[in-house]
Every structure is written in structure tokens, then in C-alpha cells.
Image: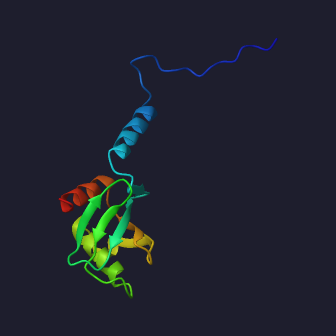
Amino acid sequence: MPPPRKSKSQPKAGQSTRSSSAAAAAAAAAESFPSCLRPVPPSSVAITIHAKPGSKSASITDLSDEAVGVQIDAPAKDGEANAALLEYMSSVLGVKKRQVSIGSGSKSRDKVVIVEEVTVKTVFDALARASK
């Protein structure tokens, strides 16, 4: 008969492992933001945007789990709306224009905008202020 297997030691009640508490803190932090804002390592954030070109003024219309609704005051031709979107997002987020780029969806209303050197909390706070 083979010897019994040793099981991994479990922390006793009241004790916690360092990695599980860090993972729980990271999971709690990630859950408090809408899913349209995703961290991109090492220090960028991807924002899912539903663009509405051709409006009278640029503004944030919606901040939901699916996407951030953004009205753009430029027509959707020759990349004018994309340029206006990047300029507007950089001004709302308080970053330089070179830190904001279109990750995907350059010819679609549904886009992913990448913002470099920011945190998800910073982006969420700026978008929440602008949408009010």
C-alpha cells in the first residue's frame, strides 16, 4: 500500500497569505470601475468608446459598462472625427495629445482608445467629472 499523500498546508482562520490578500484587493479595485475601462500593462488604460460624430459640441454623454458615449463636434470624414476625439479625450483626461491614441476602430463608431501613463482610477474620475 502506498504512503498517504501530504496535502498543502492551509492558513488557519485569522491568518491570510500575502498573495491572496493582494489578489483580493486588486479584484475589489477592478470591480469598482466599469468594464469599458481596462488596465493595459505596464501603465496604460484602454477605454471602449461609442463615438457620435457631427454633433454641435463635444461632450461625454454616457458612462456605462459597455462603452463611454462621446459626442464629437467634427464630421466623420477624412479622419476629422478621430482627430477631434483624441483632442477632446486628452483635454478631458488632462494628458498630452501624444499620450492618447486609437487602438482599434478607426473606421467605426465603436473604438478603443489607449491612454498612456495613467491609472484606471484617474481616467474614471476624469470621465465622471466630465459626464456631469
Quarter residue 103 falls in? bottom left
Furthest toward the right, the residue is 1
Q: Looking at the image, is 122 positioned above or below residue 29?
A: below
Q: How many marks?
A: 0
Q: Residue at x 36, y 65 (%)?
A: 49
User: Does residue 108 appear in the picture of this structure?
Assistant: yes
State the image coordinates of residue 47 (x, y, percent, origin top left).
Answer: 37, 62
Can residue 94 be seen in this snapshot? no
Residue 72 appears at what percent x and percent y? 28, 76
Image-quadrant location for residue 36? bottom left
Q: Extreme bottom residue here?
A: 78
Q: Nearer the viewer, residue 31 or 95?
A: 31
Nearer the observer, 45 or 43: 45
Residue 67 vertical position relative to residue 76 in the rendered view, above or below: above
* Rendering coords of residue 10 (x, y %): 52, 20
| Residue at 21 percent of width and 61 percent of height | 131
101 left or right of 89 in image: right
State the residue at coordinates (45%, 35%). Answer: 19
For the N terminus, the image quarter is top right
Q: As rendered, which of 117 and 63 lies closer to the eye?
A: 63
In which quadrant of the rendered view does residue 24 lie? top left
Left or right, 110 with respect to 97, comes to right
